[in-house]
Amino acid sequence: MKAKKIERKVSIALLFSITLLCCGGGQSLLAQANPAVFQIFEKYSKQKKVTLLEVSEELMAEYRIKQFKSIIFEDGTLALPEIRRCIEQDKQDAKKLKEATADGLVVSGYYRLKTVDPAMNRYLIFKVGKKNKVTLLYIEGRLTPEELVELLK
Amino acid sequence: MNNKRKYIDNQKIALLIENYFEGLTTTAEEAQLRHYFQQAQISDNLLIYKPLFVALSDLHEMPQPITCLPETAKKNRFTSRLKIMSIASGFAAALIIGFFALFHESPTANYVMIDGQKYTDKTLIMHNFEQSLDNVKIDMNDMLSEFQTLDIEP
């Protein structure tokens, strides 16, 4: 009986510790839940006529960027429906900064994704250029929307 | 009469001893042998076995080694094993979570992948960074552009 009680106590303590770890250590992890467009970066990164860029804080400190990811399709015709689907998904939980459509399809979009840490910002930028040249950007860092505008001028 | 009975007993004991050395005696028979050699009157022809059975008797009366733990000790052992397992599981979970968080939280990779080929040259990385930004630049000169300003209000 006593052993069972102790066993229960230990189990509760263990669960509590794991929960704390998950909440404490994993809080930022949850905040940085990957947007749907990340699957585009992963899926098409090794394809021909595709340029994938991944830059960390180490090189981006002066821009106050913690993580920068971009993918450029020389011709994104085939990938466009999937990209748009992912953007639609990410848009649902984002603030639309600017969006342009043509024939009912998004051709450019600037979105600010939600974060738990108010000091941290995440942006998703998408643009279809001439000959279906597609550029998709993910920027995460302390840079404000104003700073983003300056960067994009 | 007594002598005859004594003779029969001695014969029986002699047979038991023989069986004992053959390994054919039961526990009860061995106890009987030990009991026999505890008494004062032992047949002369069996006296030779007395030291052996007295020693065996003494051994038998010694406290038995603990072959099974009492219930409380079992419980304590179970509890401490459980504790160790819990702590170990906790550490393992923390390590996994920590590794996962670290792996996802701090992207240290700096690279550019062109046509499936990976490059880590800093100049090339920065060039592609500029290129990516150029592709999504806001045209400030085009008055009709939809991208003159971004809605940056919170």
Image (cartoon, coloured by chain):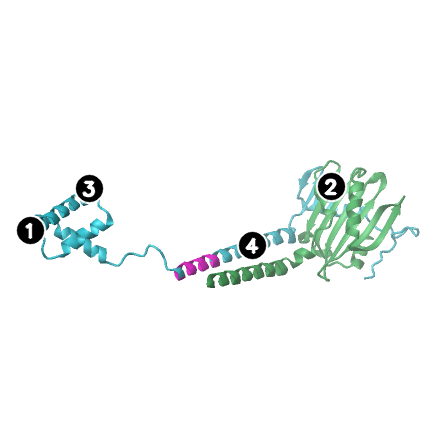
Chain colours: A green, B cyan
Q: Chain of mark 1?
A: B
Q: Earlier in the sequence, mark 1 or mark 4?
A: 1
Mark 4 Cα within 10 Å, few/some/many (few <14, many 20+)? some
Relative to the observer, which residue lies in front, A113 or A7? A7
At which x and y percent is residue B87?
50, 58
Callout 1 secondary element: helix
Q: CA distance from mark 1 to mark 4?
A: 82 Å
Foreground tag (3 vs 2): 3
**Magenta highlight range:** B72-83
Instruction: Write down the residue under mark 1.
Output: B3
Instruction: Write down the residue under mark 3.
Output: B22
Q: Earlier in the sequence, mark 1 or mark 3?
A: 1
Q: Residue at x 73, y 56 (%)?
A: A63
Badge 1 and badge 3 in a common chain: yes
What's the mark number on residue B93? 4
Q: Chain of mark 3?
A: B
Badge 2 and badge 1 in a common chain: no
Q: Amino acid at mark 1?
A: Asn
Foreground tag (4 vs 3): 3
Number of labelled discs?
4
At which x and y percent is residue B123?
70, 46
Mark 2 Cα within 10 Å, few/some/many (few <14, many 20+)? many
Foreground tag (2 vs 1): 1
Whether the residues at callouts 1 and 4 have beta carbons within 8 Å, the answer is no
What's the mark number on residue A51? 2
Mark 3 Cα within 10 Å, few/some/many (few <14, many 20+)? few
